[in-house]
Amino acid sequence: MTNSISLPSKFNQFLLAFKGVPAISIAILVTFVFFGLFGSFFLPYDPTEMDLMSAEKPPFWMTEGSTAHILGADEMGRDVLARLIGGASVSLQVSLVVILLAGSVGITIALLSGFIGGKVDAVLMMVTDIFMSMPYLLIAMVLAAVLGPSKNNIILILALLGWAGYARILRSEVLRLKDQDFVKLAEVAGCSKFRIMTREILPNIVNTLIIMATLQVGTVIIAESSISFLGLGVPPPEPAWGSMVADGRDFLTSSWWICLWPGLAILFTVLSCNLLGDWLRLRLDPKFRQIQ
Amino acid sequence: MPEKILEVKNLQTHFFTKSGVVKAVDGVSFHVNKGETLGLVGESACGKTITCLSILRLVPQPAGKIVGGEVILDGVDILEMTNRQMQEVRGDQISMILQDPMTSLNPVFTVGTQVAWPIRQHQKNIGKKDIWEKVKDMLHRVKIPSPEVRLNEFPHQMSGGMRQRIIGAMSLSCQPKLLIADEPTTALDVTVQAQFLDLIKSIQREDDLAMIMVTHDFGIVANVCDRVAVMYAGKIVETAPIRELFNDPRHPYTMALMASLPKMEEDLETLYSIEGQPPNLSNLPPGCSFLPRCEHAMDICKEKYPANSEVRDGHTVSCWLMEK
Amino acid sequence: MSEVLVEAKNLTKHFPVTKGLIFSKQVGAVKAVDGINFTINRGETFGLVGESGCGKSTTSKLILLLESITNGTIVFEGNDIAKLSKSELREYRGKVQAVFQDPFSSLSPRRRVGKIIAEPIVVNSNIPQSQIRDKTAELLEVVGLRPDQASFYPHEFSGGQRQRIAVARSLALNPSLIILDEPVSALDVSIRAQIMNLLKGIQKKFNLAFLLIAHDLAVVKHMSDRIGVMYLGKLVETASSADIYHNPLHPYTKALYAAALPSHPDQQKEKITVTGEVPSPLNPPEGCRFHPRCPEAFPRCTQEEPKLIDMGNDQQVSCHLYDK
């Protein structure tokens, strides 16, 4: 009996999965994560160490520059590269925790709302809509101003404003899945509602969650950077890309390197996240999975 | 002397995918005479729908491409036409009805507007008033009650059966030479299906319309068709006039398929069932594609695809059994 | 001696229709199932036929407790299923299982097939893993698949194979009754016979009762011992499979079977006696629901709903023609 579906071997499938992969984006993100996690071992200097003798020293390939400060030094003499690496760590921490919190809250609300339906759904969606209609950045800045600048506050604020998007989109996934036969059959088999939510529906929406999370990393980094730029975010002297850009604003025409490197770091990291998220969406979309 | 309206010669349509070339239509030849219905029978992925799309040159691109053969409509090879010329043919000389009445109509336009589109497109010299007269006529022809009122209704206000008749009206509004119906009654109830098939047959008689009826249901074939072509894995395996096919099927696939259908007059315990699974078009075995499931398989079936042999006038089969 | 397994008495399900955005008020009801009576005996197949809106799918959902009963009772093995305690409900779920139409949405895409099949067992008992594995392997063999395929995902199987997996899963708890809702209509024609034979085989082997819902009358006749014909929420006729075909009594039954497609072109094509389409269940006609379309209606039919009459020989019909 011929099996009409002939798959390539499991190993070849693994390799085939990498076709069309946005390699550069992944490379950039891997670098980001690596330095974010292990950067402290690579710091040429303490990012908060000031050395007024080296204030505004340019990158090493320019005159007056030296390999002592490869990417230059800022107005307080702090090494830009060191601060860049330190900032990566901050951005990584903030975005990961925010996504974890926002994602968990969002997916729970989506499951309860979509699966239970009725009044529970109506109430939860009303709350979600309220949160979604808040201007993200504006409220974040106001709250940051009110609560005072600190890394933890930023994380809480961004998570608080971020969960609603997950809830909305994942809820529509839950609604779609609820009507599928395998959910009805699970009920017929005697599964409790809780079991159906966690064992049947949840695994099928995780893909969407991953895609959303990847795309959100970029948004969170921009948000954190914007808030830090305004001086409401991670307080000095801890390095944050946003505040680095803010600090370098006054020196844009003279010591441009103070602004440029963190600016580029934000740009490339966020861009890579978006490209990766887009690619993941194509790869993980079940419609495309069927084509072999 | 029956007059050929459509002649398809060795049509080949391939799909170029990442995992290889899929020969969806692999050397298909048949003809349809004026006023007759040819049944194109087969299961999913046998190539019957792509054959019809190829005739209309609507094969999904860029993956799909007609790579060979001729499609001669009333003496003209339409594969050689320019896109512009082909646009003139579609809706006017050849029309198509699809399976799902739900999605075949645009939900935001009234039914009257939609039936008027083909008329507007192909008969440029008609005045507005005449168009609406024609639309009302068409609705009347497909037995829609109170056409003047229905004209202004939207698709969602109508039942599935009525929607399918509206689509019938749309396709017949320009009085085409050939109508292709792709599983038009699959989504309809039993009694609605019967009414629709009756309607199509009476219109066909009145207009001397040639029709290709694509289906997997031998009941529809028995009810509506004059001649039948059975398809398997992109090729036609048997062609015969209707009674010939039912009384004396020769290809093992045709025989097996007909034997496996439950029939109301019979009272069997178990049905004859065909072994195996439908073929995977990107991975066909060499030789005859039906080989893995064929009861009468011989050595030669593994090596070469069987040639066409004639059983009787009008009845041809592609099977090595005929050579024995 | 056949034992009654399921008995439905005056089974009714109304879906409320509400209007109003904030304070919704019930303005009407869709009488999906409206006072039907039938029995299913142990080990037999009871087929339910009817067109869209007749209520056959709703009936199956009521038996599966996927919808709540509005009125009337379903008695299973002597117990009213609407009044079961939590542990009795668990037992009931073990005895009544289902196989649905779509082989692609019946299996969770992200779980291995072995886990899908074993789930009912895992949820309802504390049997150790090793025993579960054995049982899964056994079930896979019963449906014609290999035990090693338990580690595959659903998308690695064809439609027919997925339906087999769905059947295997339904057998996991050793049920007495399996609801089959269009079990073969989404499958390729050449595969249908395989699945029908499989179902008949397991029915014999495990003495299962089936409630079969299908629109293909030949399939229903082949598989069923007794058949019930539904129209707009009412059961208009029940009889043995042979009697419904050879001796239909209700005008709708006659119309339905007359509209069924022939299995041979020479078969006597009966004239279609019914006109129009099935009205909406929101607003069913007064008196006998079929009277507007019935060729044999008379004044009493417009006023009074017919009662169920026993015609002997296990045939019952709801029609004033037989109530003189």
Image (cartoon, coloured by chain):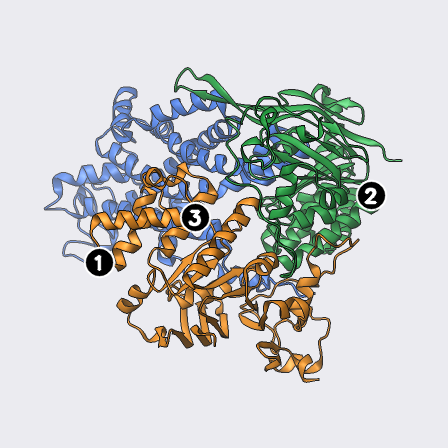
- Rendering coords of residue B294 (x, y %): 69, 71
What residue is shown with label 1?
B124
**Residue C42 visible in the picture:** yes
- Image quarter of residue B250: bottom right
Total marks in image? 3
| Circle nearer the viewer, 2 or 1 | 1
Q: Does label 3 lie on the same chain as label 1?
A: yes
Q: Looking at the picture, which amino acid does disc 1 mark?
A: Lys
Residue C254 picture quarter: top right
Quadrant of the drawing holding the C terminus of chain B: bottom right
Q: Residue at x 26, y 50 (%)?
A: B131
Q: State the image coordinates of residue A258 (x, y, percent, origin top left).
A: 19, 44
Closer to the eye: label 3 or 2? 3
Circle 2 marks a residue in which chain? Answer: C
Q: Chain of mark 3?
A: B
Query: How far apart are the alpha carbons under marks 1 and 3?
Result: 25 Å
x, y percent for residue B51: 46, 67
Q: Is residue B122 left or right of residue A16?
A: left
* Rendering colour (chain A): blue
The part of the image, by quadrant, that contains residue A40 is top left
Work out which residue is located at the far left of the displayed protein and give it.
A253
In green, which chain? C
The residue under label 3 is B165
Query: Quick check: A254 above or below C84?
Result: below
Sort mark 2 into few (<14), some (14-19) or many (20+) by Cα contacts within 10 Å: few
Chain in orange in the render? B
- B110 or A87: nearer the eye? B110
CB under 8 Å between callouts 2 and 1? no
Provide the residue designation for mark 2. Answer: C206
